[in-house]
Amino acid sequence: MALLQISEPGESSAPHEHRLAAGIDLGTTNSLVATVRSGVAETLPDQSGKFLLPSVVRFAAGDSTVVGSDAKAAAAEDPVNTVLSAKRLMGRGLEEVKARFPKLPYEFDNDCEVVPRIKTVAGPVSAIEVSAEILKSLRQRAEDTLGGELSGVVVTVPAYFDDAQRQATKDAAKIAGLKVLRLLNEPTAAAVAYGLDQRAEGTVAIFDLGGGTFDVSILHLKQGVFEVRSTAGDTSLGGDDFDQLVADWIVEQAGFDEDRSIRYHRQLMNIACSAKEALTETQQTEIDLQFDDGSRWQGHLGRDEFNRIVQPLVKKALLPCRRALRDAGLEANDIDEVVMVGGSTRVPLVRESVGEFFGREPLVHIDPDKVVAVGAALQADVLVGNKSSDEMLLLDVIPLSLGLETMGGLVEKIIPRNTTIPVARAQDFTTFKDGQTAMSLHVLQGERELVQDCRSLARFTLREIPPMVAGAARIRVTFQVDADGLLSVTAREETAGVESGIEVKPSYGLTDSEIEQMLLDSLSHVEDDVAARSLREEQVEAQRVIEALDAALAQDGNALLSAEERAAIDSASAVLHDAMTGSDHRAIKRAISALDKASSEFAARRMDSSIKRALAGHKVEDFS
Ligand code: ADP
Ligand code: MG
């Protein structure tokens, strides 16, 4: 995850001309542009007075691309050339897109595996180009309204967007001819819009229920520092699902057969959406369906009935809220403010339920459609240099744990997932063998116990460790993740002061689905992992015992042991060698204690002889 550090525009005292800056909420369903004028952030309407630009692009032959309401209106008649919800495809590969969204009406150009392209009459287009069209339209709107070129923009992205998705968003802005000052997390933008960044300290939950997706984020702020403590959500929960349930209800009430409900799907969804939105204001709404085959159905829907219909969706949204709290290590009553974002938080039942869940009235006085764009505009205004920066620092968390490989292919976690960055954590390790002069370090990312199940980030070697007996060296390994999410790992042998290190970029190339998968895997493999860990631990212990014994035998075996005694030890050692290759950790443990027993007399004699060696030449008084 990227981090936002807002500290630049230096010479705040030097007056300079006002630069045009804008904040853009590039949404899945709707997009907006906002700017700060005379110190007040406001969203900019189009020529017909509408603020929301539907995130829909219709491609046509020639140079007549249509963006917004007109494109949306054409979606039913020209689904193949009209792209909706392109944001969902941003930064994803073709395979992933097909797996995630099997029902998309588009045909993909199979030539390009890396960036999926939708075949349209205007040629193949990627999600980046679709987004660029939306951004171009908003840029035009802003420049027409403000009467000049934009110096820079802040574009918002979901907090969970990974590097690829963020990069894709930046690319889209570039194609649209915009200078991106910074990408800003949507929940952070919403918090900024409410001025929550001005507080001394607090924890806020941002509840964002849009058209097709749901996100909840827990932010912590302290002295102008903003951290994302956790994020959770549901990528297929939003206003569209409310519409679908209402449409299903209409189909049932009207007694439509399947043919009819499929044929008039779009029309049903539209009327359901209108009914839903009307019920935000009123207690009852009339539904009047007139089809092109001349038939008609009229009915009405009351708010209580509507609440009953959508109740399961509201419940579903509370699950990620619980998860986000748990990941942040908080209880509902630790939350100081709840901010509502997204058109679907207008639904009264949603407001009530969220209020009940967190035990406080959510903040709703800034239009939930506009709040993200407003926050982005405020940030853009600071970044472009119109305001003296108040050193606003926006922090983030690492999405997956970072750790090191230890003996036996196990992973020792050094920084657990969801830790706020920047962060530095150190842990001490030691050598495994006598006289060991080098140690190789393997840096890993993931939640699982075994190296093979985690993602390898980097390897490096610490050399010139002075030779010592096993376990005597003290090697301090420090993991440091800086403000930009860049990880550096250093290892230092404390007695000799030798040091070695490496820098890695942990989130690079990891998609959020991979992150999700790694988290899911860690949950579903807990038991396997525990067993695997025990096995590895016993194997490591066996290896250690055998190596120590072999060294001792080489040194003192002939002098201190009879042939019989030696044979007994060798046979116990062979049993352990055998057990080590198996997968029963208990058998290894038994063989270790058997070998311990067989060699205990030998160990005692070595102890005596070494004491004798040590004592030789000393007077007893020296020791008392
Ligand atoms: P996104 O962030 O996905 O672009 P928005 O935040 O613009 O989405 O939310 C769009 C959703 O909000 C749509 O499903 C729309 O029906 C819903 N919505 C807008 N206004 C209302 C309202 N008054 N009552 C209920 N739902 C509404
Ligand atoms: Mg949104």
Image (cartoon, rainbow, N blue to C red):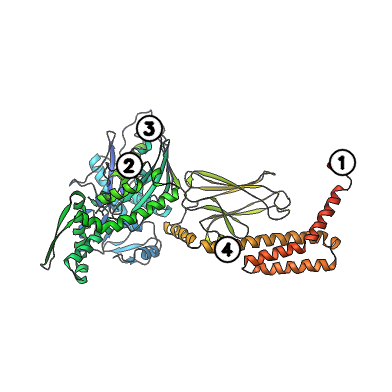
Q: Which residue is mark 1?
A: 621
Residue nearest the observer in this picture, 516 or 164 = 516
Q: Disc 3 versus disc 1: distance between alpha carbons?
A: 76 Å
Going by the numbered disc 4, the residue's amino acid type is: Ala
Residue nearest the observer in this picture, 392 or 16 = 392
Compare marks 3 and 4 and give the one earlier in the sequence.
3
Q: Which residue is mark 3?
A: 388
Mark 3 Cα within 10 Å, few/some/many (few <14, many 20+)? some
Asked if one can make out residue 195 in the rendered structure from this viewpoint, the answer is: yes
Residue 568: percent from left, percent from top: 79, 68
Please give left or right for residue 429 compared with residue 79 in the image.
right
Going by the numbered disc 2, the residue's amino acid type is: Gly
Q: Disc 4 versus disc 1: distance between alpha carbons?
A: 52 Å
Going by the numbered disc 1, the residue's amino acid type is: Glu
Mark 2 Cα within 10 Å, few/some/many (few <14, many 20+)? many
Residue 321: percent from left, percent from top: 37, 51
Q: Which residue is mark 2?
A: 375
Residue 205: percent from left, percent from top: 37, 45
Q: Residue at x 80, y 60 (%)?
A: 601
Q: Which residue is mark 4?
A: 532
Residue 284: percent from left, percent from top: 16, 53
Mark nearer the viewer, 3 or 1: 1
Q: Disc 3 versus disc 4: distance between alpha carbons?
A: 56 Å
Q: Quadrant of the C terminus?
A: top right
Going by the numbered disc 3, the residue's amino acid type is: Ser
Compare marks 3 and 1 and give the one earlier in the sequence.
3
